[in-house]
Image (cartoon, grey):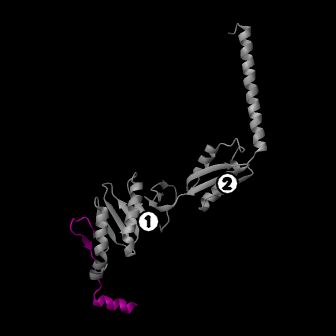
Amino acid sequence: MWDNPRALNRLTRLILAATLLFALWTAGRTALDAWFPFRQITITGAAHAETLEAAHALVPKLRGGFFSMDLASVHDDFGRLPWVRNADVRRLWPGRLVVHLENHRAAASWNDRALLNVYGEVFAGTPWRSLPRFYAPEGMQKEVARRYAEFAGIVAPLDLRVEQLVVSTRQSWRIRLSGGVSVELGREKLHERLRRFTDFYPRAVAAVGPIPRVDMRYPNGFAGEVQPRPGPSQQARQAGQA
């Protein structure tokens, strides 16, 4: 081909045409950005202060106009912000960009290192004291979140809350309820065993006093650790101290 002047001329014309088209495309894109910029960028749904602050810091870094902005890249950038579960990015004619952020809703702390949302998804965050605490093997997040909702519904009529949920490496479940009572549920029939606990617990406490630990793994019964009630002399001392 290099010895063929006609072929070389054709190649040269093709290169020049491609260069011209690229230059026209670049100029057109620049012109479009200038003629159709985003005049308004609206961020909605960012309920968490840390999310809102990070989102507003990201806005000046966005590049492109109405037709040239890479919305997939913008979606990814907003999706990586703290507390963001999902980002929805849309452009509205003639010059508006709308970003709706769905925040994670924390349900519990996860193994004291992260947070778990209501969908059973782990996300970065610092647990706070009032959150329930979950301890379980990795990969069990969704099942633990589902069981937590189930257990919370069972004990709610007793005005009890699930404050801690522990799953061992052998898949044995234990929960700690408000008031400090610990309930061993074992590896099977968890719903049935917790139901049985709610049936007997109020009557048992009324009869024998506080029961800090209950083992529900027995097929036809349970074992409880009873906290001794103070005797008359101890009650007198407590009354005197009061």
- Name of the residue lying farthest toward the left: 220
Give amino acid for label 2. Ala
Give the residue drawn at x 76%, y 30%. Answer: 23
Q: Are marks 2 and 1 in contact (CB under 8 Å)?
A: no
Q: Secondary structure at mark 2?
A: helix
Query: Mark 1: few, some, or many residues within 10 Å (few <14, many ≥20)?
Result: many
Q: Is residue 7 above or below residue 194?
A: above
Give amino acid for label 1. Pro
- The answer to which of 148 and 178 lies nearer the viewer is 148
Horizontally, residue 237 falls left or right of residue 32, namely: left
Coordinates of residue 138 in the picture (x, y in percent): 40, 52
On the question of residue 227 being in view, the answer is: no
Distance, label 2 to label 1, CA atoms, is 32 Å
Give the residue drawn at x 37%, y 65%. Answer: 151
Query: Mark 2: few, some, or many residues within 10 Å (few <14, many ≥20)?
Result: few
- The answer to which of 13 and 92 lies nearer the viewer is 92
Coordinates of residue 200 in the picture (x, y in percent): 28, 74
- Name of the residue lying farthest toward the front: 93
Q: Which residue is mark 1?
A: 132
Q: Quadrant of the C terminus?
A: bottom left
- The answer to which of 230 and 114 lies nearer the viewer is 114
Horizontally, residue 49 falls left or right of residue 96, namely: left
Magenta segment range? 215-242
Give the residue drawn at x 36%, y 61%. Answer: 166
Q: Which residue is mark 2?
A: 57
Q: Secondary structure at mark 1?
A: loop
Coordinates of residue 100 in the picture (x, y in percent): 61, 55
Residue 224 among those drawn in magenta = yes
Residue 80 among those drawn in magenta = no
